[in-house]
Image (cartoon, grey):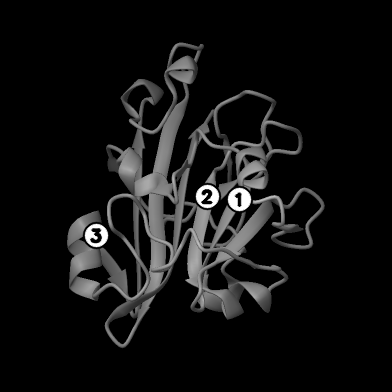
Amino acid sequence: MLGFVCLMARAQSAPPRTQATPPCSVTEDSIFHGARICGKSREGSLGKADLTVAGFVIGESTLEDITRRFPGSHQFKLTEEMEASTGICLKSNGDDAVVFSSGDLTAPRILDSVFMAKAGTFEKQGAKCLEVTILPDGPSTKSGIRLGMRKERVLARLQVTRLQGTGFEVDYSTSPGNAPWLPLKFKASDTKGSVAMSGVYGGFRNGRLRWVVLYAGVSN
């Protein structure tokens, strides 16, 4: 699959930043292994609603916000790399779960990606998921993207045009001033030469959404 992005550590209070070098593919069994954009991204951006899950917004909310709201949640490193991103896993009364992640090393650790999949998928890769009642129907974006959603609806909602097997992806790039998910205080800062990147990738099983990763960040 083409077009995945890995987000790296950022300076305090800076907008989300991106880094390259990982491989071009991610699977459900390697969901926490970041990947880079290998193909051409579209001009534009995902909407803020597409990047909002359980009220937390990528590029705006922080891991500290999630910890305050869910004091019993556990933080974990997504991979064994020295500067691996940190995640917090929450699961619903069923087996659906969400991981909020940030590559920041110091607070405030701004969210740069959100993962949605079965809790078992996350737990066998090192996550310790806290069961919460705020997700009675499972995690979903504010725009309505959720696990188990029919393939046709997912592709139509995200305007996905590139598929490979059971996987999909869509990547966008635009100027920071045109990114609806980027807070105004960051848009007002010096972002000359920077590019706001956002996107989503995931996979289907039996015609329904099995796992999905949403991301957003600003590259130099």
Determine the residue positioned at 17% across, 61% down.
Answer: 156
For badge 3, the amino acid type reads: Val
x and y percentages locating residue 94 in the rendered image: 49, 78
Kindly indicate the quadrant of the structure image that contains residue 15: top right
Q: Are marks 2 and 1 in contact (CB under 8 Å)?
A: yes
Residue that lies at the very extreme toward the right in this rendered image: 82
Residue that extends furthest to the front in the rendered view of this protein = 133
The residue that label 2 is drawn on is: 113
Ranked by sequence position, the earlier of labels 2 and 3 is 2
Marking on residue 101: 1
Between 10 and 140, the residue placed more toward the observer is: 140
User: Could you tell me if residue 8 is visible in this image?
Assistant: no
- Residue 61, relative to residue 86: is it above or below? above
Residue receiving disc 3: 160
- Alpha carbons under labels 2 and 1: distance apart: 5 Å
**Seen in the image, is 121 located left or right of residue 202?**
right
Going from N to C along the chain, the mark reached first, 3 or 1, is: 1
SS at mark 3 in the image: loop
Picture quadrant of residue 153? bottom left
207 w.r.t. 178: above or below: below
Determine whether the residue tagged by mark 2 lies in a helix, strand or loop.
strand
For image coordinates 33% across by 50% down, the residue present is 142
Neighbor class of circle 3 (other Cα within 10 Å; few <14, some 14-19, many 20+) is some
- Measure the alpha-carbon separation of dots 3 and 1: 24 Å
Mark 3 vs mark 1, foreground winner is: 1
Residue 33: percent from the left, percent from the top? 62, 63
Q: Mark 2 against mark 3, which lies toward the viewer?
A: 2
> Which of the image's four quarters has the C terminus?
top right
Q: Amino acid at mark 1?
A: Ser
